[in-house]
Image: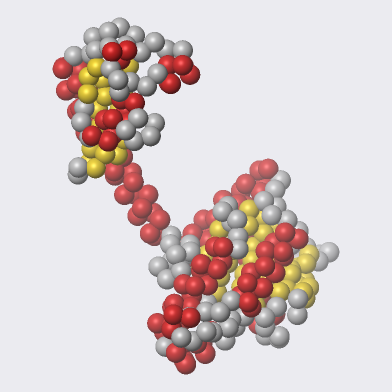
Amino acid sequence: MPLGEGVVGWVAREGKPLIIDDAHQDERWCKDMDEVTDFQTRAIICAPLMFKDTVLGVIELVNEKPGAFSEADMRLLNSLADYAAIAIENARNYQQLQEITVTDDVTSLYNSRYLHETLAREFERAQRYSLPFSVIFFDLDHFKNVNDAHGHLCGSQLLTEIGELIKKNIRTLDVPIRYGGDEFVIVLPQTAKEKAVHVARRLRLSLNEGVFLREKDLALRVTASFGVANYPQDGSDKDSILRLADEAMYRVKESTRDGIEIAEPLTDGGAAVAAEDK
């Protein structure tokens, strides 16, 4: 229910508990839920879940009998609401803490700790449902030159802007990770190798077309070296997929830079690397 609409919305907006003996006689009552559930609401008792003067939610009980709820019921419900509010706030704080521990503070992407959790989860899902997943590993070219020429604050700002660019070029279910320094990993669930290569091309193009650190009056251009690997085409376990994508990226880094290389399976169960977009 929207804030202010119906009895629940009124209690949420006002932050006050409420007993209604006959909903049909109260202008705040909204009959939409009764029409959906085929329930005949008459008596209502409603209490806000309050934590430090903030309404986290509302508990509402309804009864088909008019006048079914008493002040004793309200005291009991308020007590329950107090405990529920504390539990909800603790759960929210725990979730926020978990997000902090897996989030990189420079780019707001996930960190390397979350990478291994994600790979384990996607590998298990891929095995269970016979689904593919892909990994893109890329490293910014000559990032050290930015730090040396303009300082580490500019380097950190560049990484922040790169993080935003990554998020704009991937799906919501993809997992973008700052692996360390200027290295990034993107885990693409349920994604075939061809689709992953398309994402890598899009990222490379966006980097090449982007102009960074405009606020610092620098207008820097950036390129990166990319490696792509896929399960199950290129490897049989999560660690090998990450390693193969990393090795493919380093082949670009050690040759032309600003390119994409794709891991390819070998007949003996290993993998080779194919050049692409050199």
Q: Nearer the viewer, residue 21 or 147?
A: 21
Q: Residue at x 30, y 7 (%)?
A: 65
Q: Position of residue 197 (x, y in %)?
A: 72, 65
- The vertical placement of 213 against 11, above or below, is below
Q: Residue at x 46, y 91 (%)?
A: 148
> How many numbered circles does the render carry?
0
Q: Is residue 216 left or right of residue 15?
A: right
Q: Is residue 120 left or right of residue 148?
A: right
Q: Position of residue 126 (x, y in %)?
A: 66, 49
Q: Nearer the viewer, residue 109 or 161?
A: 161
Residue 54, image quadrant: top left
Q: Is residue 6 left or right of residue 141?
A: left
Residue 250, image quadrant: bottom right
Q: Nearer the viewer, residue 52 or 255?
A: 52
Which residue sits furthest front? 27
Q: Can residue 135 be seen?
A: yes
Q: Residue at x 43, y 62 (%)?
A: 103
Q: Quadrant of the N terminus?
A: top left
Which residue sits furthest bottom? 149
- The vertical placement of 2 against 43, above or below, is below
Q: Position of residue 183 (x, y in %)?
A: 55, 74
Q: Is residue 256 left or right of residue 184?
A: right
Q: Nearer the viewer, residue 235 or 5?
A: 5
Q: Residue at x 59, y 76 (%)?
A: 210
- The vertical placement of 277 against 8, above or below, is below
Q: Can residue 63 be seen?
A: no
